[in-house]
Image (cartoon, rainbow, N blue to C red):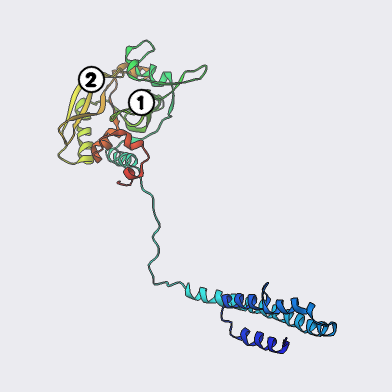
Amino acid sequence: MDVKELKKQTIDNLAKIKNLVDLEQYRIKYLGRKGEITSVLRSLKDLSLPKRKKIGQEVNELKKKIELKIANLKIQLIDEETRKKEKERKIDITAPGTKIAHGHLHPLTLIMRKIEDIFQAMGFRIVEGPDIETEYYNFDALNIPQDHPARDAWNTFWLKSKPEKLLLRTHTSPMQIRFMEKNNPPFRIIVPGEVFRYEATDASHFYNFYQLEGLMVDKRVSVANFKAIIEEFLKKLFGVDVEMRIRPSYFPFVEPGFEVDMKYPNGEWLEIIGAGMVHPNVFKAVGYVPSNWQGFAFGIGIDRIAMLKYKINDIRLLYSGDLRFINQF
């Protein structure tokens, strides 16, 4: 067993190490379970006592030196590799930046904002109301008392509440009462918001949807004013070739009442607005003298407007959360 030759090998081979992989192979070669230094130490039992002491001391000293050199060299190699990687990752300030993925607005939000902009340009003020309403504001003050058959037209989500009966609003019309109770004419307002109906869903109906209420009150307001405003609104939203029609209809809180239909590209008519001249009983409920004021009110189906604008054939798509649909807008 030539310890001098083993020392020379460890020194020569240590000088050849270039990276951490080489260093680990070196460690295994000399200090591993089957390494050369480990084998020498295991063979000492076969030697005479004097040789065992002499060679054992020399080999243990060599083992400690090798362990120290490996530890020091490992620190050095890690530091060199770190500096090399940092140099390779050096930022090129002239390179284009990575684009950040941005979200985008839902089609209902897009159409709502567009509609609000159009009406604001015509002098309408935006106000908002609560989703949870009282029976008084949702029905009674709008000329729909408890025994009125028209209540059947609003399939209502009633809430368990005492003593006042509460519900999820079935339309945005309650804000007519709330606003007029605190404000004097003349004024013109719109009220965007979500409404709720307890009804089955299909391609054109959903249990929650969006409306935009409109109300204009002044000394002299007529159906002609309403028609001019709605025509202007539809032209701004859809373009000059919009085809619309006004049909007589019935709503308890207006007299006379009418509906506005708009023609689909396929030639079918779709109701998008329910409207009429404010009923005298509604004015009385808020303390106005009906003979002094005139006004019209209207409710626009935002979902149906969006379906027309973006050629959507099923209202349920708007609430599906399906990104394959949403990402088209």
Q: Secondary structure at mark 2?
A: strand
Which of the two labelled residues, at mark 2 and mark 1, occupies the earlier sequence position?
Answer: 1
Residues under numbered marks 2 and 1 in contact, where contact means CB atoms less than 8 Å apart = no
Give neighbour class at mark 1: few <14, some 14-19, many 20+ (Cα, 10 Å).
many
Quadrant in the picture for residue 192: top left
Quadrant in the picture for residue 16: bottom right
Pinpoint residue 304: horizontal percent, then vertical percent. 27, 33
Give me the residue at 35% from left, 42% from top. Answer: 106
Nearest the eye: 321 or 58: 58
Horizontally, residue 64 falls left or right of residue 202, namely right
Relative height, residue 87 to residue 305 (above, below): below
Nearest the eye: 208 or 288: 208
CA separation, marks 2 and 1? 17 Å
Q: How many marks?
A: 2
Pinpoint residue 74: horizontal percent, then vertical percent. 63, 76
Give me the residue at 85% from left, 85% from top. Answer: 50
Nearest the eye: 31 or 172: 31
Give the residue furthest to the top. Answer: 147
Relative height, residue 128 to residue 13 (above, below): above
Nearest the eye: 67 or 48: 48
Tell me the tag on residue 249.
Answer: 2
Question: What amino acid is labelled 2 in the image?
Answer: Ser
Q: Which quadrant of the figure contains the N terminus?
A: bottom right
Relative height, residue 156 to residue 318 (above, below): above
Horizontally, residue 159 falls left or right of residue 99, namely right
Tell me the tag on residue 196.
Answer: none
Which residue has dot 1 on it? 171
Question: What amino acid is labelled 1 in the image?
Answer: His
Relative height, residue 12 to residue 229 (above, below): below
